[in-house]
Image (spheres, grey):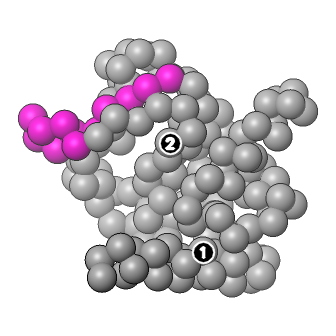
Amino acid sequence: MPEGQSKYAIALLAGVGLFSSCSPDELATIWTLGTIREFDKGDDLVLEGAPGTELFLILEGDARCTTGDTELATFSSGDFFGELALLEGGYRSATVTATGPITVFELPANEFRQLLVDQPEIALRLLAGMAKRLRQTDAAID
């Protein structure tokens, strides 16, 4: 990936709540674990009920998130989904389908978990980011 695109992609990765406390160098390291994938209109990126084994960050394009026949959300460039799969696995709670050609960054959970073992300082930053989001959520509820 050209340098400019890489910086753009890492900036998008910084916008993922889970990674918001990571340094640019840590984000660059995380970036090296993933791959760029392209999907066509109508392709399912994840299926409801399937094991959650990766995070997706949309670089270009759009997708819709559904459960059954109900549309829950739409995603576009800069949006992400599947972040909980990186930490706890579990099953997908919805299906995400490309609404046109789409390019995503895909981060596999197994490689990400190994990074946390190898570089525990990143794990500490992730915990800080999660704690920050929890505080924000609590404040919004009060």
Identified at 22% across, 43% down, the residue is 72
Q: Quadrant of the N terminus?
A: top right
Q: Is residue 94 visible?
A: yes
Q: Residue furthest right?
A: 3
Relative depth, front residue between 122 and 21: 21
Instruction: Report how far apart the C-alphas of labels 2 and 1 lie in the structure.
Output: 17 Å
Which amino acid, by three-letter code, is at mark 2? Asp
Residue 93: percent from the left, percent from the top? 25, 55
Identified at 34% across, 35% down, the residue is 74
**Does the magenta segment cover residue 141?**
no
Pick whichever of labels 2 and 1 is earlier in the sequence: 2
Q: Is residue 33 visible?
A: no
**Dot 2 crowding, Cα within 10 Å, few <14, some 14–19, many 20+:** some
49 lies above or below 90: above
**Dot 1 crowding, Cα within 10 Å, few <14, some 14–19, many 20+:** some
The answer to whether mark 2 and mark 1 are in CB contact below 8 A is no
Residue bearing the label numbered 1: 129
Identified at 69% across, 78% down, the residue is 125
Relative depth, front residue between 42 and 59: 59
Q: Residue furthest left?
A: 69
* Total marks placed: 2
Residue bearing the label numbered 2: 79
Residue 23: percent from the left, percent from the top? 81, 66
Which amino acid, by three-letter code, is at mark 1? Gly
Relative depth, front residue between 53 and 128: 128
Range of the magenta residues? 61-72
